Image: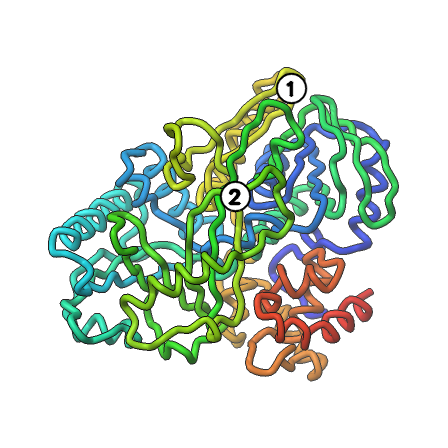
């Protein structure tokens, strides 16, 4: 295999490594920190602890980014919404963490995203002035967080001609212009989690997917290997529960109120070129928008709703209600000149935000709950980290490890993750397609070399979608993919469109069978 400047051997996750490290962990000596959950927060906890020199085992009942962390808007928010709600500390923290990702730890995965708020007849002049003041306040947050202007440009007003140049799909009639703002966005949220887990593995953390925590206390967990059914015990000096919306099922006293956010998947040719994303105001609501988000794979996401999850059972994969789809289509229909009908929806997905219940008044919806995270320590010594959002995963992880250290059973220095680059961060390799660089960073050359060595791996997995067979092979060899769903639903996003997923299953099975 062609050499790469990244420490691929140390950071590679594979089925063989999983078996080896699981055997050494279950029934073996105690690790310093056991992490339950391998979404962004859990993988971040594993990295933070490992980078402090602690021994770490991190488990998940499913795969990396199986839950909430693959269903986000892919945005790295600067906290403008929280500023408007008076949550100044949350807004500042979000802006700081956005800058950390964009400038230091993951600049290959996070880039600046322009957004246009069209001033349609439904947006009053007072509403436009309020939105403009908000964008100026958001730029002040950028300054306070010390994020360079070259990374995030200033907001500005747009003429009607400029607005339609950035968003040709907008309806021209009645358009008074627009407001241009900038925020951070991920090329793929699940790729961020994969990079976190692999970086932690490079620091010695044992990343163990398909390992379910059956019982949890301050000294470890009884676990089950979901591939073999075998049970055992992982002993630990400190335990961190980072199971997101499922955290309350592992530790008593943790009350989670999940909020459902739904996105639609549209084919890019439906709306034509979209150089910028769109903020489309929800009629009758002053600070709520539907986002239209062009993706680098040619698709467009439309989201999101914010609705409380009904019932007491938290599903592994949330269903998308038709009411959510209808709501999103109705809102985009108020601004677009191109009709978007139910038949145009190629796919849809819903994610559950793990909001901490409390702090909102009786009858308040989940949109009223704070996105401030909390770190709770149970009477048995289990540290649970809940709430928050994708942008602030690093700070959540830092606070969780700080709490574990404060418990007195492990000793470590302060967090080091504000300046710790993730796998793939670094100078872009030459002679490699830009799309690969945006997804793999410095490792793009090695992924590209697989196709050079075997022309068959250069071919797209599905006609019209850019993912190649080489990327599937890379996912098995280095990114811990164990089955077709890992490859198609999380290492790439083919699974968001049912027909394309079905067409790609054969290539995924070939990759799983062909990589030793």
Task: In the rendered structure, find residue 43 and report the number of the disc placed on it.
Answer: none
In the image, residue 16 sits, relative to residue 414, either above or below, namely below
Residue drawn at x 68%, y 57% is 479
Q: Which residue is mark 2?
A: 309
Query: Dot 2: within a 10 Å radius of its alpha carbon, few (fewer than 14), some, or many (20 or more) residues?
Result: some
Q: Quadrant of residue 35?
A: top right
Question: Which numbered disc, 2 or 1, marks the residue closer to the eye?
Answer: 2
Say which quadrant the N terminus sits in.
bottom right
Say which of 171 and 166 sits in front: 171
Say which of 394 and 337 sits in front: 337
Say which of 433 and 221 sits in front: 221
Task: In the rendered structure, find residue 381 and report the number of the disc placed on it.
Answer: 1
In the image, residue 78 sits, relative to residue 335, either above or below, namely above
Say which of 158 and 321 sits in front: 321
Q: Which percent across, then down, holds residue 75?
A: 42, 54
Say which quadrant the C terminus sits in.
bottom right
């Amino acid at each position: 295999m062609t050499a790469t400047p990244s420490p691929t051997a140390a950071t590679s996750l594979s089925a063989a490594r999983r078996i080896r490290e699981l055997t050494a962990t279950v029934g073996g000596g105690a690790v310093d920190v056991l992490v339950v959950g391998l979404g962004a927060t859990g993988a971040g906890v594993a990295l933070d602890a490992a980078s402090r020199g602690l021994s770490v085992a991190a488990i998940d009942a499913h795969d990396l980014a199986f839950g909430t962390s693959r269903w986000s808007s892919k945005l790295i928010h600067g906290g403008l919404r929280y500023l408007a709600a008076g949550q100044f500390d949350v807004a500042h923290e979000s802006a700081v963490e956005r800058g950390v990702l964009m400038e230091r730890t993951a600049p290959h995965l996070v880039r600046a995203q322009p957004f246009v708020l069209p001033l349609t007849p439904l947006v009053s002049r007072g509403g436009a002035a309020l939105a403009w003041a908000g964008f100026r306040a958001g730029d002040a947050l950028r300054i306070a967080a010390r994020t360079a202007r070259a990374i995030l440009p200033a907001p500005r007003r747009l003429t009607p001609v400029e607005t339609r140049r950035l968003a040709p799909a907008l309806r021209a009639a009645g358009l008074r212009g627009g407001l241009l703002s900038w925020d951070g966005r991920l090329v793929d949220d699940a790729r961020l989690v994969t990079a976190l887990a692999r970086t932690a593995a490079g620091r010695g953390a044992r990343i163990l997917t398909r390992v379910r925590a059956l019982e949890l206390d301050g000294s470890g967990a009884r676990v089950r290997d979901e591939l073999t059914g075998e049970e055992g015990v992982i002993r630990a000096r400190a335990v961190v529960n980072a199971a997101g919306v499922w955290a309350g099922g592992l530790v008593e006293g943790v009350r989670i109120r999940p909020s459902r956010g739904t996105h639609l998947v549209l084919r890019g040719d439906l709306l034509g070129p979209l150089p910028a994303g769109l903020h489309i105001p929800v009629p009758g609501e002053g600070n709520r928008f539907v986002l239209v988000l062009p993706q680098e794979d040619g698709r467009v996401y439309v989201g999101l709703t914010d609705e409380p999850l009904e019932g007491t059972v938290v599903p592994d994969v949330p269903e998308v209600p038709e009411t959510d789809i209808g709501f999103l289509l109705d809102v985009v229909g108020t601004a677009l000149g191109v009709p978007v009908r139910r038949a145009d929806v190629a796919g849809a997905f819903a994610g559950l935000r793990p909001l901490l219940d409390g702090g909102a008044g009786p009858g308040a919806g989940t949109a009223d709950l704070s996105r401030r995270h909390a770190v709770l320590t149970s009477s048995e010594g289990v540290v649970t980290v809940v709430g928050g959002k994708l942008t602030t995963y690093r700070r959540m992880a830092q606070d969780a490890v700080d709490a574990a250290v404060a418990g007195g059973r492990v000793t470590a220095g302060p967090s080091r993750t504000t300046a710790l680059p993730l796998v793939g961060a670094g100078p872009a390799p030459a002679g490699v397609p830009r799309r690969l660089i945006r997804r793999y960073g410095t490792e793009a050359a090695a992924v590209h070399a697989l196709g050079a060595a075997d022309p068959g791996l250069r071919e797209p997995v599905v006609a019209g979608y850019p993912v190649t067979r080489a990327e599937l092979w890379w996912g098995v060899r280095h990114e811990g993919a164990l089955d077709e769903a890992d490859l198609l639903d999380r290492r790439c996003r083919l699974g968001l469109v049912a027909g394309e997923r079905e067409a790609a299953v054969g290539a995924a099975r070939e990759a799983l069978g062909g990589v030793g």
